[in-house]
Amino acid sequence: MDCVRAAGQWPVDTVAVAVVDAKGTVVGSYGPQHRPFPLASVTKLLTAYAVLLAVEEGAVEWEQPAGPAGSTIRHLVAHASGLDIRRHRVVAEPGTRRIYSTPGFEVLADAVQGASGIPFAGYLAEAVLEPLGMGASRLEGSPGTGAVSTCADLTRFAAELQAPQLVAPESLAEATRVAFPGLNGLLPGYGNQRPNDWGLGFELRDHKSPHWTGGLSSPEAFGHFGQSGTFLWVDPQAGAACVALTDRKFDQWAIEAWPPFTDGVLAELR
């Protein structure tokens, strides 16, 4: 794909991008595919997928109490528990606001760890990373922000998100539908969204504006971006996914560069 070379014009020192079709084939790439990058909040996609597996295995249940009073596993993974964005404090009643919360993912991982008896980093590795052949990926810190991975590894995960083998297709379909519909909230970097739709760990494109994906992205697109200048999106209508990893913190440069890049990818796919 010629369009992926446009990432070379981003104002970053190093960038790696790849586009993966619905069959799991990398149809375009640019940059060092095997260089490790910190994922920041793209970590949440990996953590959420481990939680899907934990639910399927019966280690935890969606409606199991976890976190603040009245909150459940489902509330935590959908950013509806009422926990603050950065601190372990309650700032809203569960199910009333979409508060993007990294502490919520830490509580979520603690619940899986407690139920499984396995440290969460090990559970993530055994349940997700190793089966997908993501040998260069690991969780080094917070289950919300602490993973390190490569573009090559994340293309394997992007393929799994289009044709799931580790979880039932029905589980992934539920995870990529709106959980707790109608909740308003802040999308970091892009302001208040009404509504701020989210699935079970997956941020949903829907009709949000502004947004880090493109104007050609379908409402069904889902994924996540990270403050380390990273993103992963899947667009079911396009039958493709895209991974981008950089060594520059998310800022205005990304707000300006990412949407036209995504539009270029989608236009070439069409």
Image: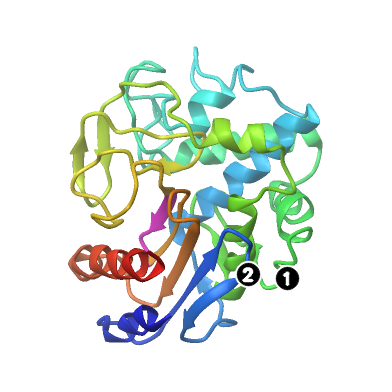
Give residue 153's mark.
2
The amino acid type of the residue labelled 2 equals Asp
Task: Locate residue 152, reporting x and y percent.
Answer: 60, 74
Task: Locate residue 59, reporting x and y percent.
Answer: 77, 29
Going 47% across and 39% down the picture, which residue do you hit?
A: 103
> Does residue 82 appear in this view?
yes
Give residue 135's mark.
1
Going 36% across and 71% down the picture, which residue do you hit?
A: 268
Distance in Å between CA atoms under marks 1 and 2: 7 Å
In the depicted view, which residue is nearer to us: 7 or 119? 7
Q: Is 224 inside the magenta-drawn segment?
A: yes
Task: Locate residue 178: give its quadrant.
Answer: top left
Circles 1 and 2, Cβ within 8 Å, touching? The answer is yes
- Colour scheme of the rendered structure: rainbow
Q: Is residue 81 above or below residue 235?
A: above
The amino acid type of the residue labelled 1 equals Gly
Going 32% across and 66% down the picture, which residue do you hit?
A: 267
What is the span of residues highlighted in magenta in the rendered image? Answer: 223-229
